[in-house]
Image (tube, rainbow, N blue to C red):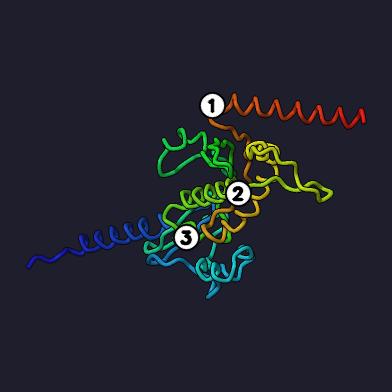
């Protein structure tokens, strides 16, 4: 049986040491950029902060008790920007960007061609009028719930967009004009889209409140929503304009009559 010479054996040791140095030491260093956060896993398990969960975190304040049990994610150790940090070969670093992103509210991550290629979102008003909504939403990954974003939800962007759209459509379908400041009911024109257009600010504020729990659910914080336009289908636009004109004329005549009286 052949044996290695001392020089060959020494060469093997040097080669093994060099491989270990490159594979396990030099390649184990990494950095985290300023707009990134990272989570380290060892054999697939994230480094956790004891037994703490998001159910006790302030981001879950908007959830009810049943939802707190459903969306109780482990709190993980978040690696801040900086470095160099070190990891072993059996460890993996999951980096995510926490920069704020702005997208169209009609964007469908699962089907880019849906909603007129992500430009117009359809919704139905309480008087069964199809409307087209356009606008933007701003969101960013929540540092306080990286477990949900990285491990808990397969496609968190798709989940958050679906949640936002469902809340928005429910609001559009049941919207009623708020009462005046003195408590008197709002004047009803019989056309819900007019009320929607006049109360865009209230609708946007409602969306902000309803989506405040998104960080606890999916690890994404909805920073703001901005609905910029609500338009009826083109085939009823002219009829709606005529009705609005007639209504404005009636209101003007009533005002003149009251002034004359």
- Determine the secondary structure under disc 1: helix
Residue located 44% across and 60% down the image: 151
Q: Quadrant of the N terminus?
A: bottom left
- Determine the secondary structure under disc 3: strand
If you read the primary sequence from the N terminus, does the residue marked by circle 1 or circle 2 appear first? 2
Q: Mark 2 highlights which residue? A: 174
Q: Is residue 34 visible?
A: no
In front of the other: label 3 or label 1?
1
Q: Is residue 136 above or below residue 27?
A: above
- Distance from disc 1 to disc 2, alpha carbons, whole Å, reads 23 Å
Q: Are marks 3 and 2 in contact (CB under 8 Å)?
A: no
Among all residues in the image, which is located at the extreme bottom?
A: 51
Q: Is residue 121 left or right of residue 89?
A: right
Q: Mark 1 highlights which residue? A: 234
If you read the primary sequence from the N terminus, does the residue marked by circle 3 or circle 1 appear first? 3
Q: Position of residue 177 (x, y in %)?
A: 70, 45
Q: Position of residue 192 (x, y in %)?
A: 63, 40
Q: Position of residue 251 (x, y in %)?
A: 78, 31
Q: Please rate how many residues cluster around mark 2, counting C-alpha atoms within 10 Å: few if below 14, some from 14 to 19, many from 20.
A: few
Among all residues in the image, which is located at the extreme front?
A: 261
Q: Are marks 3 and 1 in contact (CB under 8 Å)?
A: no
Q: Tell me, for residue 86, which label it has, or none.
A: 3
Q: Are marks 1 and 2 in contact (CB under 8 Å)?
A: no
Residue located 49% across and 40% down the image: 107
Q: Is residue 163 above or below residue 89?
A: above
């Amino acid at each position: 049986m052949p044996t290695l010479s001392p020089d060959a054996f020494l060469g093997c040791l040097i080669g093994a040491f060099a491989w270990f140095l490159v594979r396990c030491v030099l390649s184990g260093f990494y950095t985290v950029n300023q707009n990134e956060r990272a989570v380290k896993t060892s054999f697939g398990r994230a480094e956790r902060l004891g037994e703490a969960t998001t159910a006790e975190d302030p981001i879950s304040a908007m959830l009810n008790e049943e939802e707190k049990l459903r969306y109780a994610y482990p709190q993980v150790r978040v690696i801040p920007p900086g470095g160099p940090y070190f990891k072993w070969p059996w460890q993996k670093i999951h980096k995510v960007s926490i920069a704020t992103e702005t997208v169209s509210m009609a964007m469908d991550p699962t089907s880019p061609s849906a909603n007129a290629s992500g430009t117009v979102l359809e919704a139905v008003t309480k008087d069964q009028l199809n409307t087209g909504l356009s606008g933007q939403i701003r969101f960013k990954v929540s540092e306080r719930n990286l477990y949900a974003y990285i491990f808990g939800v397969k496609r968190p962007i798709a989940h958050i967009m679906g949640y936002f759209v469902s809340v928005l459509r429910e609001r559009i379908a049941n919207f009623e004009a708020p009462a005046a400041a003195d408590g008197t009911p709002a004047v009803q024109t019989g056309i819900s889209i007019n009320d929607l257009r006049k109360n865009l600010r209230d609708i946007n504020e409602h969306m902000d409140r309803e989506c405040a729990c998104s960080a606890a659910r999916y690890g994404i914080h909805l920073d703001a929503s901005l609905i910029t336009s609500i338009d009826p289908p083109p085939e009823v636009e002219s009829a709606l304009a005529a009705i609005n004109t007639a209504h404005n004329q009636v209101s003007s005549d009533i005002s003149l009559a009251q002034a004359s009286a």
